[in-house]
Amino acid sequence: MTPNRLLALCVAGAILAGTPALFSQAAPTKSPPAPRRDLNGVWFKRNPPGMDMGFTGFTFTNPKTAPPPLTAWGLEQLKGNRANNSGQFTLDQTNDPVLTKCYPPGVPRVYFHPYPFEFIQTPKAMLQVFEYDHFMRRLWMDGRALPADPDLLWMGTSVARWIDDYTLEVVSTGFNDKTWLDRAGTPHSDKLKVTERFKRIDRDHMTIEFVMEDPVALAKPWIATFYYELRPAWELGEITCSGDYLDWSKVEK
């Protein structure tokens, strides 16, 4: 593992533990322009210098000033979700399905794992491969519509299109209701719709705008932006739930 990657993952590990971390260690340098209609490569979440966004290690927006806009149903479901990553419960108290059952995190929660993902473009689909458990999404770009009655999946079914030369819009539906939207226990139903807009700012930087809509769990769309940097020298490693998280025999009672 290269020193730069080790540093990045150590910082990300602080987020995994629920501790805010300073992502930038030095002033950014100017990046060349972005290539058109090209998101290929390995991307790693990294907040811009000076932005106080420690909460993005476990949720999408500042829980004190912009909590998720939950319906009465959503608030009731939240009461039963005992999240550990936001510091509310200890490891022996949590019922987080990723930690206790090794469930897939689903979308959009998968973005909170402090590991990179890779985009691989093909003529028919954009492949999004996550280092965590090597989850893969197929973002169909062949003009198909979302299914009217989709199978309910961990990662949903996704269709994508370029809305300009630098922005890929992905719309996903057909999620099961076994996952949380984030690591703070925010619930969703199987009516969830997630829109992601991947906007390449320049060669080395990209933003992802998330719009989460769920008529059962959310009173209005929940909108957030995450920031990513290209890692051209990186290759995805092997991170698994079974070997990466919790050994219950070592949890203090």
Image (tube, rainbow, N blue to C red):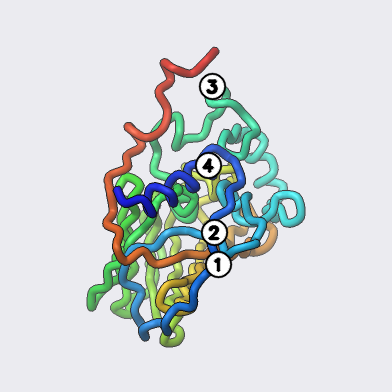
Contact (Cβ within 8 Å) of mark 2 with mark 1: yes
**Which residue occupies the foreground of this view, 187 or 223?**
223
Which mark lies nearer to you, 1 or 3? 1
Q: Which residue lies under the disc numbered 1?
A: 27
Residue at 58 percent across and 26 percent down: it is: 90
Residues at circles 3 and 4 in contact by the CB criterion of under 8 Å = no
Of badges 2 and 1, nearer the viewer stands 1
Nearer to us of marks 3 and 4 is 4
The earlier-in-sequence mark between 3 and 2 is: 2
> Which residue is disc 4 drawn over?
14
Residue 197 at x, y percent in the picture: 49, 72
**Label 1 to label 3, Cα distance in Å?**
41 Å
Q: Quadrant of residue 232?
A: bottom left
Q: State how far apart marks 2 and 4 are (Cα).
A: 14 Å
In the depicted view, which residue is nearer to us: 216 or 253? 253
Assess disc 1: are there few (<14), some (14-19) or many (≥20) residues with their C-alpha within 10 Å of its C-alpha. Answer: few
Numbered badge on residue 24: 2
The quarter of the rendered structure image containing the C terminus is top right
- Circle 2 crowding by C-alpha within 10 Å: few under 14, some 14–19, many from 20: some
Residue carrying label 3: 92
Q: Residue at x 50, y 68 (%)?
A: 208
Disc 1, SS: loop
> Residue at 76% of width from left, 55% of height from top?
65
- Classify mark 3: helix, strand or loop: loop
Q: Alpha-carbon distance for marks 4 and 1?
A: 21 Å
Q: Which x, y percent locates residue 122?
A: 23, 74
